[in-house]
Image (cartoon, helix red, strand yellow):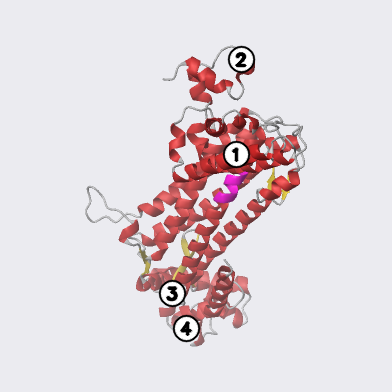
Amino acid sequence: MIGNEYCREVYMALWGGRFTQGPDQRFKDYNDSLKFDYRLAIEDVEGSIAWAYAIFKAGVLEAKEYEDLKQALNELLQEFGEDLDKIAQADDEDIHSYVERRLIEKVGDLGKKLHTGRSRNDQVALDLKLWCRKSINITLNSLVSLEKTLLEKSEAFSGKIFPGYTHLQRAQPVTFSHWLLAYLAMFERDYQRLVNAKNLLNTCPLGSAALAGTAYNIDREALAKSLGFADCTHNSLDAVSDRDHVMELLSCASICMVHLSRFAEDLIIYNSGECRFVELSDKVTSGSSLMPQKKNPDALELIRGKCGRVVGALSGMLVTCKALPLAYDKDLQEDKERLFDAMDTLDDSICMATLVLSDIQLNENKSVEAALGGYSNATELADYLVKKGIPFREAHSIVGRVVLYAISKEKPLENLSLDEYREFFNDVDDEVYVYLKLENIIAKRNVVGGVAIGQTQKEIARFKQILQSR
């Protein structure tokens, strides 16, 4: 354990002048954030380089002082890039005090001038926005890989018949490509949500100081541009207390994880012994320590399980910000751990879903058998009766009775004879069997977004064009 006297010296470097005692070690352990905010080290140095130039232009630093600070900060940047994790082992309060201490070690008292006109409040707000921007870019790249894999599989399995479900009951036949494209549509919305989130956080809070704005003549617009932001923030109270970008990013992550969880659940069911529509690769499954026959979909179950972890992070952040008074409060220190964990979890889960898809196999016989079973062509029989002039509601009732009869005889609809059909309606001919064929059922759904092969191919072409631009 580090003694209180040493703790006091460390803390004095940032805020100890008003205090006559150092913090209790228990408080220090509770209060310090370096063990997790060390992940902002690169961003903290990038912001410090930009701030050094801003206060140089404002006349706070001499040219030589600015050059010396910039060189020292760039050395830290290189050092941190080589081994970020070791920073977490230091005894500093947070990443800002760590960087400042290391800078002072390099340039002496000159390092103490860098914080002129700046607060940890606008500093951490900046660091977090810079980190979020990088994290979004990583996740966007992962989503593109997943979308491309979905697209490749949609082409590979084009036209392969697959059972469609509502309420987990067989409903109408679709194709496996159509199922894959449904998730591609979901993940594309996730991509767009993240792009929107990135655009919304594109304002620079640096220069807002603690809450009222810096007292130095800083060109905040130029400062924002130097850090790659579209603009600077326009209210200092809001800038240091704003964590909308954290909540929004966690919201985007939660929605994407829900999509991944639904994707995982579908495949867990389709891979089950009761369905066996798909076969998962050995690379993403595991066995049982007791039962040698088992092949468990652990990768998918973990995706499904980790969804709650990310949604929980969003819930926690929303509650943290609820009723939080302006401007900065230490409660906001709680933003980072859940954000870092959620984005790591999301990216890992996207990559795992991509891996699951890469070697997936379709059991065509089983999927066609399931699509034929469950009387999924009953709606087509009702449409046939409508063509014969029977109102749909009456046709619906007639077909319901036909299905009951077919169930009692343990026959699919396509195996009922014309005489059996005439027990329920007289005007029936051989065309009824054309209506009941799976291929014809699918081909009739030839509207935009429908399951017809031609529409599926158009959707594949549309997504190809979208993804080629990325």
Answer whether residue 437 is visible to the viewer in this image.
no
Q: CA distance from mark 3 to mark 1?
A: 59 Å
- Kind of element beneath mark 1: helix
Q: Residues within 10 Å of mark 2 (few under 14, many from 20)?
A: few
User: In the rendered structure, does residue 275 fall within the stretch colored magenta?
Assistant: no
Q: CA distance from mark 4 to mark 3?
A: 29 Å
Estimate the x, y position of residue 427 in percent, counting from the top left: 55, 85
Front residue of this view, candidates 384 and 189: 189
Q: Amino acid at mark 1?
A: Asp
Figure quadrant of the N terminus: top left
- Above or below, comparing residue 364 to residue 138 in the picture: below
The residue labelled by disc 1 is: 68
The residue labelled by disc 3 is: 156
Q: Is residue 209 left or right of residue 305?
A: right
N-terminal of the pair, mark 2 or mark 1, is: 2
- What residue is at 58 percent from the left and 40 percent from the top? 44
Q: Nearer the viewer, mark 2 or mark 1?
A: 1
The residue labelled by disc 2 is: 19
Front residue of this view, candidates 405 and 73: 73
N-terminal of the pair, mark 3 or mark 1, is: 1
Q: Amino acid at mark 3?
A: Ala
N-terminal of the pair, mark 4 or mark 2, is: 2
N-terminal of the pair, mark 2 or mark 3, is: 2
Q: Amino acid at mark 4?
A: Tyr
- Kind of element beneath mark 4: helix
Answer whether residue 271 is visible to the viewer in this image.
yes
The residue labelled by disc 4 is: 433
Q: Which residues are magenta?
A: 129-135
Estimate the x, y position of residue 70 in percent, counting from the top left: 60, 42
N-terminal of the pair, mark 1 or mark 4, is: 1
- Kind of element beneath mark 3: helix
